[in-house]
C-alpha cells in the first residue's frame, strides 16, 4: 500500500526558468548496457536574482560534473534520484557532465532505449532527464550539436537537424555529427542508431528549395514505406497551400520502430514512428491502416510549425500544439478523403473517447490546471476536444480572419515557447472581437448539453428558435458558466429540400446562431412553410444536443438533408432511440421496421458516396449507447443492438447480397479514398448479413475471406465469420495465424480481432491468448491489441456480471506498471466510468480500482488516474 501521496504540479505555480541554456553539445558512446553520455551546456542566469541550478536527471550513473573545466567536489553539488543541484553557480558558465545509462534494460521505453537491436529515443514529455542532466521543461530552448559514436554494426547514426560530419573510428567503430540550427526544447531531441533500410525521395518547396526526404525502416521493408512517403509529400505541399508554411531544414527523416509507447513523435527533422503507423502494403495493411498512416504522417509533419518552431511554455499548454495540430491534420484528411465522411469519422472518435472522458471522474479542461504526471494528459480532451475548440474559433471569426490570425501567430511566436492566451490574442487582434468569453472553452471541463425548441408562426411566416445550455458539474468544477457556442442551422421542407429564409434582413439558406448565455432566442423571417430544422450542422460545436423535433423530421433528414453529417446523424438518432427503448423493455417494432425501410432507401441513393453508405449501415456503438442512458446495462444494450441489427439484416437481405456481389472484383488495389469507400461498403454489407447467421451466410463469409486479395477484405471476412462462430471461424483464424505469423503488425490484428469476439466465451479466449507464445506484454502494440481492445471495444464481455473482466484488466495494469507505467496508466480508463453502470457492476469496477491504488510500489502514473477515478 502507498505510504505517501504524490504532490501535484499546478499551473498557478509556474515560474520562468532560473537559468537558460543556449547551446548543447552531446557526445554518445553507444553500448547496450553502458552508454556514456557527455554533455556540454552553455548556461546563463535568467534575471538578476541568484538561485541554485537545479537540473533533472533520473536513472543516471554519475561520472563527472565540471564548471568551466573544473571538476566540482561533492560539497559543491548534490545528486539524488531526481535532480542535480549546484548551489552557487556563476552567472554564465559552461557545465560539462558525463553519465552512464543502460538502454537495453529500459523497458519503460522513454529516454534512450533499445528496440529490435537498435537504439532509439522518446523524450516527450519528460524522457530527456533519463539521458543526461538537463532543465527538462519545454520553455528552455537551445541549439543542439550531437556526436554519436558506435560500432559499425549500428549502421545508421541519426539525430536532429543536418548531418555535418561522418567517418570511421579505430576498432571497427564510426561516428556522425549532427547540428540543429533551430532552438528547441529537450523533449524534441531524438537519436536512432542501428541497421535500417532507407527509402529516399525529395520535394521542391514553394520557394524552390529541394528537401531530401528519407524514411528508415526494418531491413527489407522499404517498399512498405512508399505510401507514407507519398503522404509526407502531400502533407508538405498542403501545408504550404493551406497555411503558407514551408519546411525549414534541408533534410526530413522518419524512422519506424517496433516498441513505442505513442503513435509517433514529431522530433525536429527526425520523426520517430510506431511501425504500425508507417508500414503498409495491400497484403498486410487495411484501408484503415492507410488512412491512419496518412493522417499521422501529416500530423507529425505539421508539428514542425505548431509544436517545434513554436512550442509550449509549459505542459499545461499541451493543447496549444496538440489540439491545433489535430485540427490541421483533420483538415488535411478532409481534403484528401472527403469532408463529410472525414467529419463523421472524427466526431465518432470524439464521442467514443472524449465524451466518455467528460462524463467520468477523469474529466478535465482542455487546458488542465494541475497534474501528477503529464504523461496522463495525452488525452482525447487535449487532442480531439482541443481541435474542436480551434474549429469553433474558425467558425466564429470566419476562414479569412482565421488564416490571418494563424499568420500573425506564426510571425509573432516563431522560435518561442508560448501560451494559449497568446494564441487566442492573435485572433482577437485580427478580428477585432473580444474573445475573453471564448477562452472558457479551454478552462472549463465537461460537455455542454444544448436544447433547441422551435415554433413556427404560419401567419407571420416566422420561425423562432429557443436555445438553452447546461453543463453538468465535473471534478473540481461544481459551477459552470455558459460557453459561447456556434450552432449552424439550416431549414428543410417536408420533402427534404432546402428552405430559404431571412435573418436580420439578409436572405440566406444557412446561418450560425451563437449561444453566448444560458438561453437565447432567434427569429428567422420569410419562412414559407413549417420547416424541418437541421441544427448543429457539421457538428459545429462539441455538445450533446436535444431538440423537440418529431421522429418524422429525422426521417426527412435521413432521406435528404444536404448537410451529410446531419443526414448521418439523423439515422444515428433514430437507431439510438430504438435500441434504448428495447433495452428498457419497451421495443418499438413498428419503428424498427420503418427505420429499416429508411436505411433501404438511403442505400438505393445512386448519388451517395459508398463510404458514406457504409457509415449509414453502422449502428451506434454499445459504448456510445451506454453514455446516452444511465445507469447503463451493457448486457441489455448489447441484446437490443443485436436485435436491431438482425432486423436490418433480414429486411435488407437481398439489397446487401446485391451490394456484396456488385462491389467484388474492383480491379487492382488502390489506397485512394474512392476505392477504399467501395471496399468499406462491401465489407459493411457482409458484416450486416452476418447479424442473421445461417449456413448460407457462413459460406459467403468464408468465401469472402478465402478469396481476399488484400488485408481489408481478409479482415472483413474474418470479422463476419467471428460473428457467426463455429468451425469455419476457428479454421480461418488458424489459417490467418499460420499465414502471417512472421508479420508482427498483422498478428496484432489477429489478437485485436479475437478481443472483440461477441461470444459468451470471449473472456476465456482472451485469457488464453495472454499465454500464447506470440503475446508479449512488454510490446505496447501487442498489449493494446489484446487488452485495450477487449476492455474498450467489447463492452458486453468486459462487463461480465461476475467481474472477471475487471479483474483481468486490473491484473494487466499492475503487471505492466512494474516496467512501463506510461502504458499501464492508459489501461485504467475503462474502469474509470464505474459510476455510469448499474450499481452491481459499478461496485465490482470500484473494487478493482481500490485494489490498484492499494498495490505496493504503484507508479505515479497509475496512482493519479486510479485515485481520481475513485474520488467523490
Image (spheres, rainbow, N blue to C red):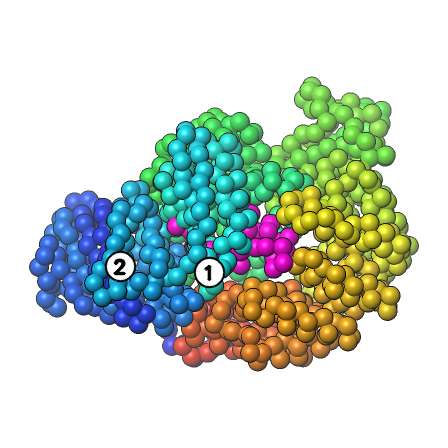
Residue at image point 33% right, 56% down: 157
Residue at image point 36% right, 33% down: 412
Mark 2 lies on a secondary structure that is strand
Place residue 576 in its image quadrant.
bottom right
Q: Is residue 407 left or right of residue 340?
A: left
| Rendered position, 50 above or below 842 | above
Instruction: Give me the C-alpha separation between circle 1 and circle 2.
Output: 21 Å
The residue that mark 1 highlights is 218
Q: Is residue 604 left or right of residue 75?
A: right
Residue at image point 70% right, 34% down: 489
Place residue 156 in its image quadrant.
bottom left
Residue at image point 74% right, 63% down: 705
The picture places residue 869, in percent across and down from the top left corner, at 53, 66
Residue closest to the eye, 838 or 228 = 228
Residue closest to the eye, 139 or 154 = 154
The picture places residue 356, in percent across and down from the top left corner, at 61, 58
The tally of labels here is 2
The residue that mark 2 highlights is 174
Residue 282 among magenta residues: yes
Most distant residue in the right direction: 590
| Rendered position, 285 above or below 796 | above
The picture places residue 674, in percent across and down from the top left corner, at 69, 43
The picture places residue 446, in percent across and down from the top left corner, at 57, 52
Quarter in which the N terminus is drawn = bottom left
Residue 836 among magenta residues: no
* Residue 470 appears in the picture as rendered: no
Mark toward the start of the polypeptide (1 vs 2): 2
Q: Which span is picked out in magenta?
A: 270-296
Are circles 1 and 2 on residues that touch, CB within 8 Å?
no
| Rendered position, 78 above or below 456 | below
Q: Callout 1: 10 Å neighbours few (<14), some, many (20+)? A: some
Amino acid at each position: 500500500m502507498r505510504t505517501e501521496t504524490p504532490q501535484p504540479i499546478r499551473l498557478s505555480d509556474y515560474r520562468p526558468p532560473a537559468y537558460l541554456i543556449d547551446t548543447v553539445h552531446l557526445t554518445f558512446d553507444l553500448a547496450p548496457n553502458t552508454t556514456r553520455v557527455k554533455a556540454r551546456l552553455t548556461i546563463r542566469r535568467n534575471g538578476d536574482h541568484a538561485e541554485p541550478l537545479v537540473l533533472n536527471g533520473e536513472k543516471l550513473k554519475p561520472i563527472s560534473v565540471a564548471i568551466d573545466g573544473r571538476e566540482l567536489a561533492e560539497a559543491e553539488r548534490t545528486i539524488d534520484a531526481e535532480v542535480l543541484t549546484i548551489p552557487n553557480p556563476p552567472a554564465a558558465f559552461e557545465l560539462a557532465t558525463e553519465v552512464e545509462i543502460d538502454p537495453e534494460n529500459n523497458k519503460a521505453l522513454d529516454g534512450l532505449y533499445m528496440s529490435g537491436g537498435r537504439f532509439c529515443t522518446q523524450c516527450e514529455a519528460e524522457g530527456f532527464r533519463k539521458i543526461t542532466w538537463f532543465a527538462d521543461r519545454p520553455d528552455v530552448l537551445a541549439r543542439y550539436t550531437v556526436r554519436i559514436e558506435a560500432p559499425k554494426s549500428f549502421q545508421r547514426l541519426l539525430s536532429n537537424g543536418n548531418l555535418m560530419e561522418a567517418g570511421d573510428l579505430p576498432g571497427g567503430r564510426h561516428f556522425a555529427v549532427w547540428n540543429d540550427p533551430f532552438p528547441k526544447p529537450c523533449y524534441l531531441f531524438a537519436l536512432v542508431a542501428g541497421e535500417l533500410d532507407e527509402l529516399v525521395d525529395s520535394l521542391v518547396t514553394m520557394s524552390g528549395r529541394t528537401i531530401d526526404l528519407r524514411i528508415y525502416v526494418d531491413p527489407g521493408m522499404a517498399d512498405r514505406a512508399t505510401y507514407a512517403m507519398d503522404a509526407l509529400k502531400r502533407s508538405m505541399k498542403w501545408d504550404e497551400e493551406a497555411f503558407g508554411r514551408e519546411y525549414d531544414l534541408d533534410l526530413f527523416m522518419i524512422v519506424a520502430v517496433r516498441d513505442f509507447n505513442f503513435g509517433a513523435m514529431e522530433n525536429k527533422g527526425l520523426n520517430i514512428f510506431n511501425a504500425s503507423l508507417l508500414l503498409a502494403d495491400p497484403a498486410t495493411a487495411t484501408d484503415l491502416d492507410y488512412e491512419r498512416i496518412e493522417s499521422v504522417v501529416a500530423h507529425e509533419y505539421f508539428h514542425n510549425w505548431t509544436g517545434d518552431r513554436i512550442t509550449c511554455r509549459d505542459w499545461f499548454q499541451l493543447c496549444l500544439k496538440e489540439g491545433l495540430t489535430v485540427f490541421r491534420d483533420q483538415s488535411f484528411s478532409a481534403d484528401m478523403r472527403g469532408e463529410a465522411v472525414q467529419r463523421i469519422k472524427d466526431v465518432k472518435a470524439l464521442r467514443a473517447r472524449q465524451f466518455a472522458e467528460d462524463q467520468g471522474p477523469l474529466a478535465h479542461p482542455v487546458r488542465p490546471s494541475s497534474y501528477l504526471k503529464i504523461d496522463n494528459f495525452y488525452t482525447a480532451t487535449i487532442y480531439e476536444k482541443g481541435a474542436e475548440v480551434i474549429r469553433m474559433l474558425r467558425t466564429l471569426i470566419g476562414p479569412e480572419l482565421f488564416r490571418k490570425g494563424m499568420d500573425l501567430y506564426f510571425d509573432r511566436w516563431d522560435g518561442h515557447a508560448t501560451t494559449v492566451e497568446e494564441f487566442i490574442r492573435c485572433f482577437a487582434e485580427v478580428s477585432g472581437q473580444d474573445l475573453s468569453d471564448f477562452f472558457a472553452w479551454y478552462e472549463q471541463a465537461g460537455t455542454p448539453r444544448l436544447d433547441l425548441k422551435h415554433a413556427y408562426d404560419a401567419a407571420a411566416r416566422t420561425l423562432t428558435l429557443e436555445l438553452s445550455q447546461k453543463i453538468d458539474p465535473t471534478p473540481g468544477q461544481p459551477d459552470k458558466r455558459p460557453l459561447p457556442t456556434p450552432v449552424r442551422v439550416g431549414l428543410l421542407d417536408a420533402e427534404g429540400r432546402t428552405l430559404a429564409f431571412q435573418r436580420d434582413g439578409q436572405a440566406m439558406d444557412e446561418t450560425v446562431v451563437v449561444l453566448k448565455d444560458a438561453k437565447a432566442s432567434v427569429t428567422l423571417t420569410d419562412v414559407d412553410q413549417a420547416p424541418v430544422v437541421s441544427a448543429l450542422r457539421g457538428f459545429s460545436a462539441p455538445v450533446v444536443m436535444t431538440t423537440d423535433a418529431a421522429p418524422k423530421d429525422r426521417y426527412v433528414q435521413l432521406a435528404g438533408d444536404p448537410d451529410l453529417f446531419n443526414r448521418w446523424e439523423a439515422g444515428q438518432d433514430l437507431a439510438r432511440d430504438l435500441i434504448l427503448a428495447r433495452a428498457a423493455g419497451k421495443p418499438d417494432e413498428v419503428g424498427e421496421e420503418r427505420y429499416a425501410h429508411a436505411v433501404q432507401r438511403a442505400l438505393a441513393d445512386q448519388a451517395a458516396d459508398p463510404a458514406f453508405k457504409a457509415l449509414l449501415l453502422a449502428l451506434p456503438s454499445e459504448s456510445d449507447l451506454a453514455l446516452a442512458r444511465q445507469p447503463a446495462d451493457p448486457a441489455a444494450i448489447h441484446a437490443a443492438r443485436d436485435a436491431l441489427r438482425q432486423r436490418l439484416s433480414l429486411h435488407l437481405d437481398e439489397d446487401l447480397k446485391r451490394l456484396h456481389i456488385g462491389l467484388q472484383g474492383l480491379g487492382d488495389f488502390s489506397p485512394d479514398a474512392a476505392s477504399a469507400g467501395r471496399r468499406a461498403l462491401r465489407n459493411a454489407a457482409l458484416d450486416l448479413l452476418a447479424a442473421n447467421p445461417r449456413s448460407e451466410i457462413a459460406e459467403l463469409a468464408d468465401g469472402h475471406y478465402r478469396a481476399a486479395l488484400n488485408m481489408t477484405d481478409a479482415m472483413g471476412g474474418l470479422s463476419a465469420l467471428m460473428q457467426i462462430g463455429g468451425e469455419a471461424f476457428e479454421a480461418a483464424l488458424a489459417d490467418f495465424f499460420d499465414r502471417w505469423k512472421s508479420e508482427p503488425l498483422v498478428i496484432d490484428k489477429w489478437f485485436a480481432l479475437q478481443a472483440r469476439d461477441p461470444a459468451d466465451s470471449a473472456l476465456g479466449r482472451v485469457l488464453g491468448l495472454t499465454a500464447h507464445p506470440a503475446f508479449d506484454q512488454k510490446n505496447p502494440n501487442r498489449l493494446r491489441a489484446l487488452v485495450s481492445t477487449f476492455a474498450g471495444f467489447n463492452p458486453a464481455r468486459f462487463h461480465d456480471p461476475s467481474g472477471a473482466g475487471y479483474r483481468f484488466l486490473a491484473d494487466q495494469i499492475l503487471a505492466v506498471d512494474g516496467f512501463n507505467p506510461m502504458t499501464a496508466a492508459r489501461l485504467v480508463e475503462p474502469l474509470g466510468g464505474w459510476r455510469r453502470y448499474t450499481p452491481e457492476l459499478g461496485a465490482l469496477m470500484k473494487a478493482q480500482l481500490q485494489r490498484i491504488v492499494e498495490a505496493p510500489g504503484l507508479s505515479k502514473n497509475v496512482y493519479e488516474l486510479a485515485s481520481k477515478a475513485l474520488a467523490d
